[in-house]
Every structure is written in structure tokens, then in C-alpha cells.
Image (cartoon, rainbow, N blue to C red):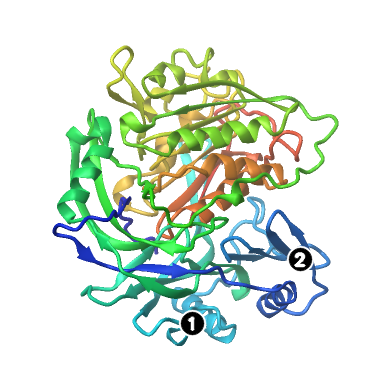
Amino acid sequence: MFGDFRYLLVWCCALLTVGAVNVPVLITERRRMTNEEAIQLTSDLFGTDDYSFTVSDERVYVESADRLKHLEYDTVSGGITAADDSEPWSPAAGPPGNLPSEPQAMEMAIEITKRLNILPADGLLPAEIELIIKSDRTSGTYVAHEYSDGAGGYIREDYLIDVSAFFDISIKVPDYPEPLLLTGGGGKFKVAFGSNCRLKEFQALWRPIVGSKPYEIMPQEEADRLYQQSLGALAGTATNITSFLAYYSEPFGTLQKLMYPMYVYEGNAVVGDESIPIRPQATRGGDGTGSSHPGMKQFPKRQALDDAKLFEAASEWLGEPYGLTLAKRNADGFRNGVQDTAPLGVYRYEKSNKDVLESDFVSEADTWADTVDMLFYTGHANRNGWMVAEPGTGAEMFIDYRSFGAGPEVPGDLLGQQDLEWLIIAACGPHQDQHINPSDGNVFDRWRGIFDGLHIMFGYATASVDSSEEGGRFMKYAQEGDTLINAWFRAAKELQTSEVIVSAMWTDDAWDDHLPGYGCVSSDNTLGSQERWIMWTTC
């Protein structure tokens, strides 16, 4: 059910006349909705109830009296997210019953979108623009559970907890022979169904196209040159580079008045013996897309608990020298989010580029990674680990799962034995698994050894888009009271393309962990008898 994912790098097209191709810039506006219309849409999605709404930081929030059915309308981007949490999944609940088949899920999703007139229609477009909407892609949320068999081995159970249908949009414009795919965090239509075929989640972001204006994109050769230049130290080992042209739709919480065509690249780089996806990035040109980022403003914080313990955080990141132009802003957003929780949260340290070392996570973990409760890493990764720098030279190195041992207590005293509880790997891994791609093997075999007291390891199971906002949005939603896993998943769903698979692996009761001061936190478990879980969902 999970499709192959293209390792994307989106490079903004710029005006150039020699050898250029004409592809228009699209003029867009946000979808408008009154408060009453937001309530009506919630009722149409989830049934009649006693709904009410509040307005907070440029979002309209609708919820039922029991607060289990809710919808958010983002007034900046026009995006809509809605969910029915009346039958929430938990590790204790096990597999849900009576899930729809993939064809059933798509059929129900088509009926819902038609009945509510949610999908864009050609009749509302400029005459020269044509939309092609494909409704043939499904995915879902998967869970795997591992526990001891009592004889030195492990038992693994896998199951599906929901089924999602996606609608993919391409745009046909004059003077260009092929339709251009709509990519980016926006332009999404996702409908998910849970037990008994109940509508569980709905996500839609479409900015109506109201016009276009001529635009000359740079020749392919110039775009290729700029792409290679952007790779920094990775340029010499980049392989399998291909590209295509697409329209880039900004994510939730972002104003976008102009939608530019961009070259989309895919490729890998070689670091030591490892082939890693080159983490995607979206670079907007100096003439701008009409974008702003008001969604990064902090929502009003929940009242922190009086008896909350102090938590400490840090970040380590690889930036422009390693082909990642947005990593610094990503780490800045995380740091700002931690500091926004003061006096509960304290930001202890930050290391970047050539100072991000393997020893920080292994031999000197008691000085660095394991001295804080939460560590945010952004850089490059694959299924086996993540990239670091060689001491002294700053050359690319790789830290892999073997550095953390075969299991908890083997060798022990690494991540979590002293302090670390939550490790975020904002990169292209490391949770690839045989359930998604059989050649990737069992994710537990690689990563059970990292849990020497660690509660949750956040990451992805595919290539993921380089973002300036992951860290900030994650902290914002955690401060609103979401569990840490839900905060991570929500940030990814808003920012990543719909082919990306986001993930979280945890031990025992850590599924319900919150940011300290904003909800419960589970206790440490450093024993080999711990149970481990992982969840994957498509963004």
C-alpha cells in the first residue's frame, strides 16, 4: 500500500531568457469559509452534534460538546484538517475491527468529496487552466509491536489501524506539453477511515487559481548547475540525479499568492559505505511566491502543571555545507519553541556542521546527547543511521545502528541511561522497514539497541522534505497539549508531501508521553524485557 517515494529537491525557477521555457505563474487565493460554514462542514463530515467554535491565532477551531469531533480551518492558507477521535487507537486496544478495503476506502472518499463539493472543479478555473485529478492511491497507518519470546528471541506483530485515500492533482497549462504535478505540503486531499469504516481523518488544502501570468523558467542545464552547487560537500558523490517540472504548493499556515513552477530533483549521495537520500528542500526565489509564515507564531500555551519537572533540550544539525539550506532555521524554530516553555524548558547546547560528531551519541554521550531530555537532529539519514562530521576535517561520516548495540543493556549506558528520553531524527530515515519495502529488513533488529532508557525515537521511513518549520511546529503542538507523537505526526502532515511516511518508535507506555508540564510522562525502562512499538503513517 505504500508506494515508492521520489527523493525530492525542489529548486525555484528564475527568470532567464536564453533557452528558457514559458510556463505561467499561477495566481492563487485562499479558500474562504465563514465560521458557520466551518460548523456545517464538521456536521456534514461527522454527523449532527452540538458544535461550537473558537478563533485563535488565525485558525477557526470547531469541536463537538464532548470534544471528540473537531475541525480546524486555517484562515491563512485556507487549509482544513478534521478528525473524529471517538474511538482512539492505543497500544492496549490492539487491531481495530472491520477496516475498509483499499477499493472501499477510495469509493467512500470519492463519495464524500463529491457530496461536499470539496475537490477543485474546472468550472471555477481560468479558461486556459485544466486540472487532472487522480483518485487511485491508498495507504494507511501501520503499527508493529515487538516483545520477548522468553527464549532470547522476539515476537513481532503487525497490523493496520486505518486506511487512507489520496487525491493527486496535476495542472495542464498552455504552451507546455505535459501536465505538471502539484507538489509540496499544500495541494493535499486525504480521507482516512478507521474501524467499522468510520471517517477518522480529513485533510484538504487547495488554493483556488484565479489567474495566471507569463513566466520564463530557466533552462534545464542552468537548473542542474544550481542544484549541484546547492549540494555542498555531497556534490562529489551524488548519484542517480533526475528531475521533472512541477508546481509547488506551500504548506498549511502559509500565505501563497503566486504558485511558481519548479524543478523537482531526486537523487542519492554516498557517505562511506552508505547510500543516503539527499534530503529535499524548497528554495523560493527572490521575487517571492507571496509567502509568509504566520503559522509559526505560538498559540496560547496551556497552563503548565505546578509540579512539572524541568526538561532540558539541545539540537545538532547539518546545514548548507552539507546541502541543507533550511536546517539552521529548522533548529532555530525548535530552540525558540523550547525557550517559549520557560521556566520549564532549558536549552542546553547546540552543535552544527563540522561539530556534529559520532562521539556525541556514543563514546561521549554522557557529555552531550545523554545530558538532555530531548535532542533534535536534522541532517541526512537512511535506514541504517544518520550523517555526522569527521573530527577535525568536517568530512562526511555515518553513525549506524551497530554503534548502539543489539538490544537494551547491550552494551548499555548509551542513550537514555543517564537522561535522554526523546530523540528526533528530522531526516530521510531511519525507520525504513520490511513492511514498506521488503529489502529494508526488520526495523526492530536495527534500532532496539538504542533504547537504554530512551522513551521515543521520532523519524521518517522514506526521504522527507527539508523544512524550516519541523522543529517549531512540533514544539508548538506539544505546547498545546498534544502527545509528543501526535505533535510530530501533525507537523509532518502539514509540511511534508503526501508520499512521505512519518514514524515514531517507542517503548512500553511512552505512547502517551507529553512535553513535561503539559501532560503525563512515562517512566524509564532500561531492561531488555521492555516492549517496543513503531507506528508509520503517510503524510
**Mark 1 nearby-residue class (10 Å; few <14, some 14–19, many ≥20):** some
Residue 446, how many percent across, how many down?
Answer: 40, 35
Q: Earlier in the sequence, mark 2 or mark 1?
A: 2
Q: Which image quarter holds the N terminus? A: bottom left
Local packing at callout 2 (Cα closer than 10 Å; few below 14, some 14-19, many 20+) is many
* Mark sitting on residue 402: none
At 47% from the left and 13% from the top, the residue drawn is: 364
Q: Position of residue 50 (x, y in %)?
A: 83, 73
Q: Work out whether residue 232 or residue 220 is closer to the camera in this orientation and state it.
A: 220
The vertical placement of 235 against 214, above or below, is above
The residue under label 1 is 107
Outermost residue toward the front in this view: 17
Vertical comparison of 101 with 323: above or below: below
Which residue appears at 23% of the width and 28% of the height?
Answer: 272
Q: Is residue 277 left or right of residue 422?
A: left
Residue that protrudes farthest toward the right in the picture = 306
Looking at the image, which residue is at 49% across and 47% down?
A: 503
Task: Report which residue position mark 2 lands on.
Answer: 63
Give, as a three-letter code, the residue at label 1: Glu
SS type, badge 1: helix
Which image quadrant for residue 212? bottom left
Q: Position of residue 2 (x, y in %)?
A: 39, 60
Nearer to us of marks 2 and 1 is: 2
Q: On the rendered structure, is 342 left or right of 166?
A: right
The secondary element bearing badge 2 is classed as strand
Residue 143 in view (yes/no): no
